[in-house]
Amino acid sequence: MDKDAKIFVAGHRGMVGSGVVRIFQQQGYNNLLLKNRQELDLTDKQAVGDFFQQEKPEYVIMAAAKVGGIEANRRHNAEFLLENLEIQNNVIYQSYLNGVKKFCFLGSSCIYPCQCPQPIKEEYLLSGPLEPTNEGYALAKISGYKLCYHLSKQYGFNTISLMPCNLYGTNDNYDPVNSHVFPALVRRFVDIVDDGGKEITLWGTGIAKREFLHVDDLAGALLRLMLEWNDPTFVNVGAGSDISIYDLAYKIAAAAGFQGEIKWDSSKPDGMLRKCMDTTKINNMGWKPEISLDAGIKRTINEYRELKYKGLIRQ
């Protein structure tokens, strides 16, 4: 990619999209097309078509998606499936029709069956049933990847697809209802410390394990693959190791300064009990994450506290 290439980052205000924008700008890519939802509704087929015909981006990063935590996904599978299909279909197909040179699709580790062998290899896709609590989102991401893959195989459309593990970091969503587990724990522990609380109750049993990657590491992997990799088959992007939610909670609690009692509500769902991806494929390309979990926790707590004290966190 030339440094003056026109690059459309769909979803640039989200955690992943903003991470992509940061690293592209740091590396001198300054001709970025950035549209918020008020300027361009990606669910609007006509609007997306008009945008591509007018702007003619050379490269597209598909970071836009309707996302949420386990409760939001469980309660709104239909909406997660429908809206993500609309967004993906419009952006992917218009990219193909308008001659985009290279398209990057971002998926999620939730595409894998709920009873996958561990660590999860790319070949395990569609080898079993999905986790019911986020089936809608998972089906949408599988469909987006498959559309990219088949457009590539049939018509030579240059696509790559990345499937990251659980992401966290700068510009995460700390909404008390719709956030994922990492930012939710950061918010709860920082808030209870600020309020002087001595006891906290968390969802589930804590036995479920998850793999976490800082969004800046994902952005670094994405830029590297945009420059060096041309293959429509997807690649896992992760830390290569996981941690139980129980242990994660205690790490975040300690970093936030919480010294009270942590209780667990086993009546709430744990979700998929383990989800650790095999990262051999991308590691063999020379990429590995640079931000440790402990360092990422400290950074995220500091960022949340700054946002909170500036009044930028919705209560």
Image (cartoon, rainbow, N blue to C red):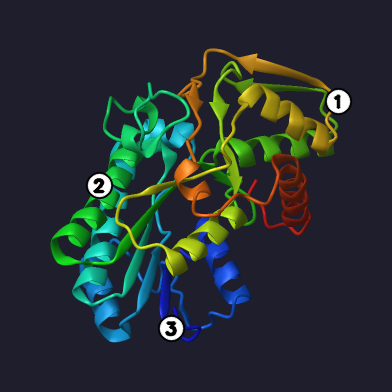
Count of numbered marks: 3
Say whether residue 73 is visible.
Answer: yes
Which element type, helix, strand or loop, lies under badge 1? Answer: loop
Residue at 59 percent of width and 39 percent of height:
212
Residue at 46 percent of width and 24 percent of height:
271
Q: Quadrant of residue 258?
A: top right
Which callout, 3 or 2, points at the residue further toward the start of the chain? 3
**Is residue 257 left or right of 136 when viewed as pictured?**
right
The answer to which of 20 and 74 lies nearer the viewer is 20
Q: Position of residue 98 (x, y in %)?
A: 23, 77
Amino acid of disc 1: Gln
Which element type, helix, strand or loop, lies under badge 3? Answer: loop
Q: Which image quarter holds the N terminus?
A: bottom left
259 w.r.t. 218: above or below: above
Give the alpha-carbon distance from disc 2 to disc 1, as whole Å: 45 Å
| Residue identifier under label 2 | 143
Amino acid of disc 3: Ala
31 w.r.t. 272: above or below: below
Q: Quadrant of residue 272?
A: top left
Q: Are marks 2 and 1 in contact (CB under 8 Å)?
A: no
Q: Where is residue 69 in the image (x, y as percent from the top left)?
A: 49, 37
Which element type, helix, strand or loop, lies under badge 2? Answer: helix
| Residue identifier under label 3 | 5
| Residue identifier under label 1 | 259
Q: Where is residue 315 in the image (x, y as percent from the top left)?
A: 65, 46
Give residue 120's mark: none
Residue at 75 percent of width and 50 percent of height:
299
Task: For label 1, count other residues whose C-alpha is less than 10 Å away and answer few (under 14), some (14-19) or many (20+).
Answer: some
Task: For label 2, count other residues whose C-alpha is less than 10 Å away and answer few (under 14), some (14-19) or many (20+).
Answer: some
Amino acid of disc 2: Ser
The answer to which of 312 and 112 lies nearer the viewer is 112
3 vs 2, front mark: 3
